[in-house]
Amino acid sequence: MSTVAVPHSPVPNSQSPELERGLRMYRRMLMIRLFEEQVNDLYTRALMPGLAHLYIGEEAVAVGVCEALTREDYITSTHRGHGHCIAKGAALDRMFAELLGKEAGYCKGKGGSMHIADPDTGNLGANAIVGGSAGIATGAAFAAKRLGNGRVCVCFFGEGALGQGVLYEVMNMAALWKLPVIYLCENNLYNEYTHYSDTTAGDILTRARGFGLPAESVDGQDARAVYAAAKQAVDHARQGAGPAFLLANTYRFHGHHVGDVSRDYYRSKQEEQRWKAERDPLKVLEDWLAEQGVPPANFDSMRAEVQTEVDQAVQFAIAAPYPAADKVDQDVYA
Amino acid sequence: MPETASMIKEATREITLGEAVREALAEEMRRDPRVLVMGEDVAEAGTAFKVLNGLVNEFGPERVLDTPISEAGFTGIAVGAAMTGLRPVVDIMFGDFIGLTMDQMVNQAAKVHYMSGGKWKVPMVMRATLGATRRSAAQHSQSLHAWMCHVPGLKVVLPSTPYDAKGLLKSAIRDDNPVVFFEDKMMFRMKGPVPTEEYTIPLGAADIKRAGDDITIVATSSMVQVALGAAKLLEEYEISAEVIDPRTLWPLDEKTLIESARKTSRVIVVDEGYGRYGATSELASVIAEGAFFDLEAPVKRMGAMHVPIPFSPPLEDATVPTEKAVFEAAKALLGK
């Protein structure tokens, strides 16, 4: 059971590593985008139980960051976590299967959309408590340092988690003990249905700098910029220089969850349109790739290939069986 | 058959419960380099109760790690470290502070294994204290172990003797699940026989601390001593009390409790946690369901009074079950 192998699109000219990276990131971002569009479709057709928090609009953050990681490195994710999991290498068929509560899913259907975890790709788990994974991520970095295995951990969280005290407790310890952890704040502007400026006093980066962490902000719609910033933080951490804080400025194109369709009371349609038209991370990277000479047809074929992969993955998940009822009390204890 | 103090071989000395805890930690740290201790003032200070005195000298500050006063933070770090290759033992100075760690324990540690479909494990131990009558008032005196028992995914251990403390803590450290280990502050200096040779006690095995025929007293942690004291008082009335210590509230050795209840037909359950919705309620229900047709009387529950623990000594003393109170309750159950 793995992702259906799809041949990669023909690539233009001789490839610079930078161009190769750009194409790789583009393809991965496209996987997230098309996966999430499929999730939206499944949900609105009432095929998917529960909640779905779409990552559309923020793809460049997860992909840019994970491009700077090895498969063995760790991540922790959030309730809006599909993008992080895919960026870290999750297979789409097992992702969909988990979202549908099927036995073939990453967590045998016991976790669902908000709890995908996968040791094979270093995914310590998506976490549906806001800020809930800050301790786990810092602990993984703690163990990596103690065991000397050279791994780093990226703790993805939204700007809503800036309101959780435990984040500052663990940042303090990460700084004291020089742990290889990167606190990656995705500021998509909204704590659920509330603009972050209504919940967040002072300057975000100053909070991290108060603990002595190097902290900077990056354009979260630009995968190349995210990668460059993440690479620097990851290298810094891997060399033993300790934690870092990155603030990725981004935007949630959809609502807080799929059911959040009437959003006028907290943000305007014009604002959404402006981000979609001017700051779509796929478009930003596509423009750069085009400048490098990637012909338009290549984007079309890549999209078709990824769409096929998504279609096959979702068909796999729909056809897959639910767990037998007697599995309900398995895995409570190791 | 559960191991009991009566099975202890000759090479035995008397040590305190605190020393037994320290020995268990030291032995496990020698055996397994992944084991480490972290918490507030655990290193040079050896904890506020001096239970870990000297541990840092053998294992160094990297493995006996002083943390900031951030219970939620270092508990969360322990969860992540446990998932990725270490076996942390976190020290929560006063059990009252587990309130600060609840998200890490309840929503993270307890659920990681299940939510991941069994892929990630959290082999960690949280050591915490319980127990009143230390004149420490409402925020340093509670016995909150029932909170942890309520959550699937956690195991909960309450030793009542130095022997049990050592054997159970070693098993807790070797367990692949998050285990919460509650030590009664008033028992750290209590001495008891502990063999010099290595042993472990499995989690989930109750111990019959005293055999008897007329009434069963199920007791936990320091209430075992209270129950044994009451049993002695009952002897004078020719009442033979059996005292059973579940030792672990989860997993729970229901069989031993029910068998004793069926034999004696009268049961008192004594625990220092709050009585209402507490450990005594669960134990009494298990016994009532399992031994209903053999019981001559309703199972009697005795827990802490439903009040914040007061400071003033006579008030505080009134909140917890005593030998005398258990003795009187037993007599009443037997109609004597």
Image (cartoon, rainbow, N blue to C red):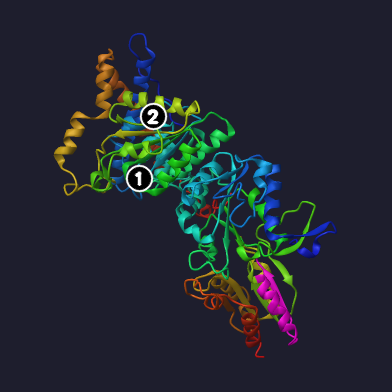
Relative to residue A274, is residue A7 depicted above or below? Answer: above
Q: Which residue is mark 1?
A: A161
Q: Residue at x 35, y 18 (%)?
A: A9
Q: Residues within 10 Å of mark 1 (few under 14, many from 20)?
A: many
The residue nearer to you, when weighing B91 against A80, is B91
Looking at the picture, how far across and down is residue B13, in whole percent? 80, 59
Region rendered in magenta = B224-246
State the mark number for residue A65: 2
Q: Residue at x 28, y 21 (%)?
A: A299
- Circle 2: element type: helix
Q: Is residue B226 magenta?
A: yes
Relative to residue A70, is residue A198 depicted above or below? Answer: below
Q: Is residue B245 magenta?
A: yes
Residue A159 falls in which quadrant of the image?
top left
Q: Look at label 2 and name its amino acid.
A: Val
Relative to residue A235, is residue A263 depicted above or below? Answer: below
Looking at the picture, how far across and down is residue A175, in whole percent? 46, 37
Relative to residue B65, is residue B180 depicted above or below? Answer: below
Upstream in sequence: badge 1 or badge 2: 2
Position of residue A28 in the picture relative to residue B23 (left or right): left
Q: Residues within 10 Å of mark 2 (few under 14, many from 20)?
A: many
Q: Are marks 1 and 2 on the same chain?
A: yes
The residue nearer to you, when weighing A331 against A93, is A331
Position of residue B231 in the picture relative to residue B107 (left or right): right
